[in-house]
Image (tube, helix red, strand yellow):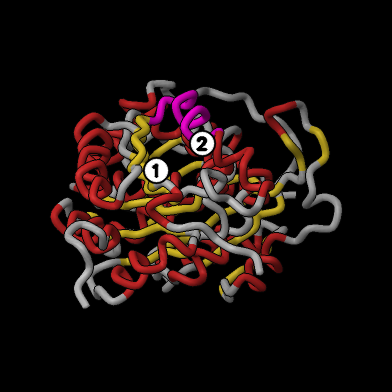
Amino acid sequence: MGQAAGSDWPAEVYRRMQELDISILAIVPDAGLTRLLELCKADAAMTVVTLSTEEEGVGLCFGAWAGGKRALLCMQSSGTGNCINALGLPAFTKTPCLMLVTMRGQAGEANPAQVAMGSAVAKVFRAMGVEVAEAQASQEVGVLFGEAAEKAYDQGRAAALLVSQQVIGVKTFE
Amino acid sequence: MLSRRAVVADVMKDAGDALVVAGLGTPCWDLYEAGDRPGNFYMWNAMGLTAPVGLGLALAQPQRRILIVTGDGDMMMGIGSLAVIAAQAPANLGILVLDNELFGETGGQAGLTGARADIAAVARGMGLEKSVTVRTQAETADLAMLLLKESGPALAVAKVGANKDPARYPTRDGVALAWRFRQAACA
């Protein structure tokens, strides 16, 4: 019962996290992040930090960088709005802040309340100087994640990969 | 009421090679006045994030002592991070909250700890058992031991006066501050 090549994007992100020496996962969970979270939790070398709100992860990424470690911040699109002022920290210090965002509020969204933030994510991120890429297919996620990581770690800046709702699947309310 | 400058200066006498993160506003000026050092980082923005920055450091450098020096406003804005810290339970992390019950940098408007909020009680509720409030000089004698030596995480709220001390400021070059700090942390 194998999956089509490239369709297991969380495993691909996890593999690249290891290659990139990312040892801390800071997360506010989302259904679309469940498999990545489980992979990281099963890894004794990975520190998983459950946050109370997403902007804490921006501070945590900075603290980890200052201490010589790499952290990844994962969240649902609604959490990106919580990070806006926090993103002033990597901007002011020109330090890495790598983010992986699973999207809501796109095609197929059954909850209209998700649309306002979902459709604003890329705009507000860019307004704060974040480098933004979006994966429209699961096969793209790994490569785009690697590119976002390069931008964050090599250029000392915030970079985000948005994983679109057509990759994650839509949530139903029944 | 305690003098915030004296509390910070006293604790910093025992800081050794601890890495210290100061919350934005007056705690930065207090720490700077106690003596600038490469192992100090001054938050110039991102209110509410001082504790998460300290947690990231504590996880990345488990062999080093990490001290957060912040104010009641910054701590209240990031109050949920106390639960995150309690869950991770870094033994090397101490948090000093200078509580003047005011928004000092914006003109001294009343804050929430002067109303009903008790940060040390909240911290205990979040799971940080080693959380105390100190109000007198005699009670500050054990602060450095609690925050810098004993197994953490530990939190101390120091109830300090509302006076505004003359301020000198650290550099506003964020890149220089961050890299100097990283070099001290990774040395």
Q: Which mark is residue B106?
A: none
Q: Residue at x 43, y 60 (%)?
A: A32
Residue B112 spot, x, y in % from top left: 79, 49
Q: Are marks 1 and 2 in contact (CB under 8 Å)?
A: yes
Q: Chain of mark 2?
A: A
Q: CA distance from mark 1 to mark 2?
A: 9 Å
As for residue A127 lying within the magenta part, the answer is yes
Helix, strand or loop at mark 2: helix
Q: Residues within 10 Å of mark 1 (few under 14, many from 20)?
A: many
- Determine whether, in the image, residue B4 is placed left or right of residue B23: right
Magenta range is A120-130
Q: Tell me the kind of residue under disc 1.
A: Leu
Label whose residue precedes the other's in the sequence (1 or 2)? 2
Vertical placement of A155 versus B130: above or below?
above
Task: Write down the residue under mark 1.
Answer: A162
Residue A147 position within the rendered picture, expressed as x and y whole percent measured from the top left: 21, 38
> B51 and B185: which one is in front?
B51
| Residue B95 seen in render | yes
- At numbered mark 1, what does the secondary structure look like: helix, strand or loop? strand
* Residue A115, x across and y down, in percent: 62, 42
Residue A172 lies in the magenta-colored region: no
Q: Position of residue B134 (x, y in %)?
A: 67, 61
